[in-house]
Amino acid sequence: MNKKEQINSKKIPQHVAVIMDGNGRWAKGKGMERVFGHKNALTSVRDTIEGAAEIGVKAITLYAFSTENWNRPKLEVNALMNLLITSLKKELDTFQKNEVRVNAIGNIDNLPSKAQKALAEVIEATKTNGRITLSLALSYGSREEIVNTIQNISKKVVNNQLQIEEIDEKVINNHLYTFNLPDVDLMIRTSGEQRISNFLLWQMAYAELYFTNILWPDFRKNDFFDAIIEYQNRERRFGKTSEQIETTNE
C-alpha cells in the first residue's frame, strides 16, 4: 500500500502550515552557496502543494520570508526576491492545473515593487480557483501581525465603530492577515529544528506540530503524506479529556 492510500479521507486537516527550513544547510552540504539551496527548493514546494490538493486539504500556508529574514546578507535577500518573481511566473500553469488560489499574508508593502507586481498578477489570475488556497507568508511575523491587529481594533474603539465588550475571538480573527482562512490544524517544520519561529502564533493555538529531520530541498510528496498520517494517528482533544472526545465521536 502506498503512502497516499494509507490516508483517511475523513480526517484531512483543513489548513496545513509549513516552515520550509534547511535550504542553507542543504546547499552547504554540497559545497555551494545558500542561494543554491533556495533555488533547488521549488520541487519541494510543488510536490507539497500538489500532495495537499490531491488529498483534499483546503488551505496551505508556506513560510516563505519572515520579517527577520530582512536581516540576512543583502545578496541573499536580493536573490530570494528575484527567485520569488521568477517562481511565481514559472508556476502559474501549475497553479491553474491544480486549481490553486494564491494568497499572500504579511507586510507585502515591504517587498520590492517588481515582487509586488508579480505577486498581484498571480493572485489576480488564480482568484477564481477553488480547490485549495495557497498562502505565501512574505515579510511575515506573527507578533507584528498581532500588534497590527490590536492597533486596528483600537482605532475602531476610539472612533466608536466598536465597543470594548464586543471584542472576542471572532473580532480578532477578522482583523488578522488570515481572516479568510480556518485555524491551522497541522504545522510541519523540516530540517530537525523544533520551534515555531514567530509563525501564525494565534492561528496555531491548537495545531498539531510535526517535525522532520529532512532538509526542505529533499522534502517530497510522500514525506508530506507521512506528516498527514502522523497527524491522523494523534488524538486532538482541544482541552477535553479522551473520554469526552470518544463520547462526541460516538
Image (cartoon, rainbow, N blue to C red):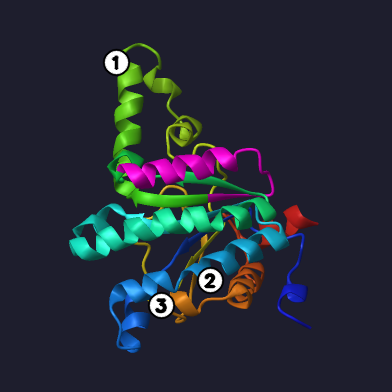
Task: Say which residue label 3 marks.
Answer: 191
- Judge by depth and name the residue closer to the eye, 81 or 139: 81
**x and y percentages locating residue 112 in the rendered image:** 29, 46
Label 2 to label 1, Cα distance in Å? 48 Å
- Residue shown at the point (36%, 11%) measured from the top left: 160
Examine the rendered structure and indicate whether residue 7 appears above or below residue 148.
below
Residue 107 seen in the current view: no
Residue 250 seen in the current view: yes
For label 3, count other residues whose C-alpha is less than 10 Å away and answer few (under 14), some (14-19) or many (20+). many
Residue 5, image quadrant: bottom right
Q: Quick one: label 2 or label 1, which is nearer the N terminus?
A: 2
Amino acid type of the residue tagged 2 in the rendering = Thr
The numbered disc on residue 158 is 1
Examine the rendered structure and indicate whether residue 31 appears above or below residue 65.
below
- Residue shown at the point (44%, 82%) measured from the top left: 213
Amino acid type of the residue tagged 1 in the rendering = Val
Residue range in magenta is: 113-134
Amino acid type of the residue tagged 3 in the rendering = Ser
Task: Say which residue label 2 marks.
Answer: 43
Q: Does 25 lie within the magenta span?
A: no
Secondary structure at numbered mark 1:
helix
Q: Does 120 lie within the magenta span?
A: yes
For label 1, count other residues whose C-alpha is less than 10 Å away and answer few (under 14), some (14-19) or many (20+). few
Secondary structure at numbered mark 2:
helix
Choose mark 2 or mark 3, whichever is in front. 2
- Residue shown at the point (60%, 43%) measured from the top left: 126
**x and y percentages locating residue 31 in the rendered image:** 30, 88
Label 2 to label 3, Cα distance in Å? 16 Å
Disc 3 and disc 1 in contact, CB within 8 angstroms: no
List the single residue furthest toward the bottom: 30
Secondary structure at numbered mark 3:
loop
Q: Quick one: label 3 or label 1, which is nearer the N terminus?
A: 1
